[in-house]
Image: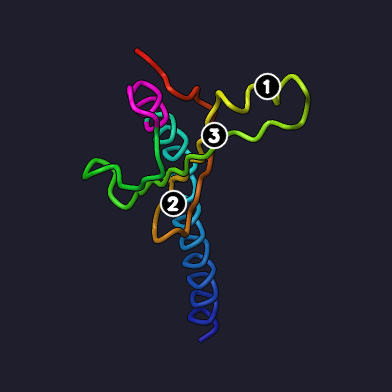
Amino acid sequence: MIAISLLAIALTTLFGSQSQSVSLGGTVKFNTQAPLLAQLKLAEISTSAENPSSDSGDFGDQFPGYQWRIEAEDANLETSEILSKLTDTLQRLTLTVSWGDDHYVYQVQSYLPKNRAF
């Protein structure tokens, strides 16, 4: 009876730590892949001849469950007189990569010139 009680306590602890390991594994996976996917999407946008607009989508079958959303707006750089001169020429992009119904979210901001010509 004592042996069965000890075994039950040990198994409960073991299953609890296993559950936590699986959860941490998902977090690590997202924290590794999301910045790389964000860089990929920003590179795609910055090499496009068109000015980006607010849009959303996913990363296809290669990365199931990962979605992206981009918000484009005029840059607001009024923190200094020198930077405020760039406000009319730059566009601020906010890119959000999410996974698992927005349970995990990674967000990055970037600035691109308006009216790019390639």
Name which quarter of the figure residue 55 lies in: top left
Q: Residue at x 48, y 44 (%)?
A: 28
- Indicate whether 35 appears above or below 104: above
Q: Earlier in the sequence, mark 2 or mark 1?
A: 2
Q: What SS does tag 2 mark?
A: helix
Q: Residue furthest bottom?
A: 1
The residue mark sitting in front, 2 or 3, is: 3
Q: What SS does tag 3 mark?
A: strand
Residue 69 pos. (x, y %): 41, 47
Q: Residue at x 28, y 49 (%)?
A: 64
Q: Residue at x 35, y 21 (%)?
A: 47
**The one of 15 and 74 positioned closer to us in this rendering:** 74
**Which three-letter amino acid code belongs to the residue tagged 1?**
Lys
Q: Which residues are magenta?
A: 41-51
Q: What residue is shown with label 2?
A: 26
**The one of 45 and 36 positioned closer to us in this rendering:** 45
Q: Residues within 10 Å of mark 3 (few under 14, many from 20)?
A: many
Residue 17 pos. (x, y %): 52, 61
- Whole-Å distance between the Cαs marked 2 and 1? 44 Å
The label number, if any, that marks residue 92 in the structure image: 3
Q: Is residue 84 magenta?
A: no
**Which three-letter amino acid code belongs to the residue tagged 2?**
Gly
Q: Residue at x 34, y 12 (%)?
A: 118
Residue 72 pos. (x, y %): 48, 40
- Whole-Å distance between the Cαs marked 1 and 3? 15 Å
Q: Earlier in the sequence, mark 1 or mark 3?
A: 1
Q: Earlier in the sequence, mark 2 or mark 3?
A: 2
Q: Left of 1 or right of it: where is 81?
A: right
Circles 1 and 3: CB atoms closer than 8 Å:
no
The residue mark sitting in front, 2 or 1, is: 1
**Which three-letter amino acid code belongs to the residue tagged 3?**
Arg
